[in-house]
Image: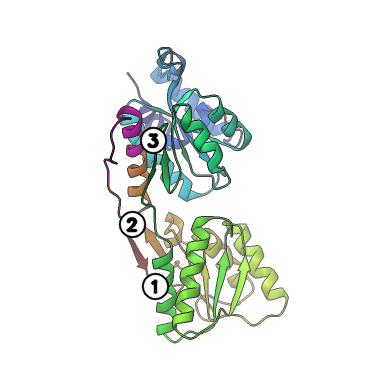
Amino acid sequence: MPTIKDVAREAGVSIATVSYVLSNDQRITDKTKEKVNEAIKKLHYLPNLAAQGLKSNRLHIIVVVISSFSGPVYQRILDDMVKVFQDHSYNILISKGKNALNFLESNQVMGAIILDPTVKEELMIKVAKSGSVIADRRHIYTKNAIYGINYIDGYEPSKEVTSLAVNEGFKKIMFVHGDKDTIDDTERFNGYLDSLEEKGLKPFAVIEGDFTEEGGYDAIKKYTEENKELPEVIYASNDEMAIGIIKYLNKTEKIVPDRVKIIGYDDIEISSYIYPSLTTIHVNRDSWATYIAKEVIERIENPLSENLKEEFKSSYEIVRRKSF
């Protein structure tokens, strides 16, 4: 029987993209939908979700709730999760916004992984009480218990990379926020602040983007157009914003890295191809995605087990390239 992996391979797309097409996401281009649907027809692939849920009144699927369908980091996380779920004969549905919340509250799914930070804990607890297994970045919620889980540490790598810049003689270091309401951004910013404090320094400047390339571009454009002094180093809370900053500064002849050094976070694939190549922080996000997917399955299949089965330890590496 063909699997979602086979469809992805035949269509030449990622597993996550096939899932987007199956859930009729409107952001997928018609060309991509056509390729995926042709592969589905050729392989005679049929998820048959309804039949799998007849016995328990729950569909044999895991919902992954995200805040945006854009961004390479989500793509990597989803691909790793899908592989685990497929290996254990679960299907995955990727959704966002009101549709995702309505689906959660319908009590039709085995479990869910919440990657959207705006989803309230009260809702996750409510859905878990009905029998679904719900995980966010910090906890797994079940009908009878809440388990703490390990997540990727953004504080220590941010503190270390800021200290590295200071130790190399730079004192004017800017931080670029993504979304200040998220745990990821908060941890990275706190690492930056604490490093400066330990070195007897204050933030040179703090500006706000939105975790997108356009957000980084617009944030540094606004800053420079106000004729403010350029920092020596800019540390952006993710690579996409850092890339937008590089593009704007090079366009306006504020050349990177000659006049300004740039550091990102995530080590997305394009960071090694942008000019100049981006110095960034690589974290073991793929291992976390696999870990959390396995834990959700463990809670579904062994609800009376008292301990979490897997262990995850956050690790990171500062990847030095040309921008710093």
For the magenta stretch, what is the residue range?
A: 294-310
Q: Quadrant of residue 97?
A: top right
Residue 293 position in % (x across, y down): 36, 38
The residue positioned 37% from the left and 67% from the top of the image is 319
174 vs 139, left or right, is right
For mark 1, give the secondary structure: helix
**Count of picture labels:** 3
Q: Is residue 74 above or below residue 171?
A: above
Hey, what amino acid is under mark 1? Glu
Tag shown at residue 82? 3
Magenta stretch encompasses residue 302: yes
Disc 3 and disc 2 in contact, CB within 8 angstroms: no
State whether residue 279 appears in this view.
no
**Classed neighbour count for the residue bearing mark 2: other residues with Cα under 10 Å, few (<14), some (14–19), many (≥20):** some
309 vs 34, left or right, is left
Magenta stretch encompasses residue 314: no
Tag shown at residue 262? none
Q: Which residue is mark 1?
A: 160
Q: Which residue is mark 2?
A: 314
State whether residue 158 appears in this view.
yes
Hey, what amino acid is under mark 2? Ser
The residue positioned 47% from the left and 46% from the top of the image is 74
For mark 3, give the secondary structure: helix
Mark 3 or mark 2, which has the lower sequence index? 3
For mark 2, give the secondary structure: loop
The residue positioned 52% from the left and 49% from the top of the image is 71
Disc 2 and disc 1 in contact, CB within 8 angstroms: no
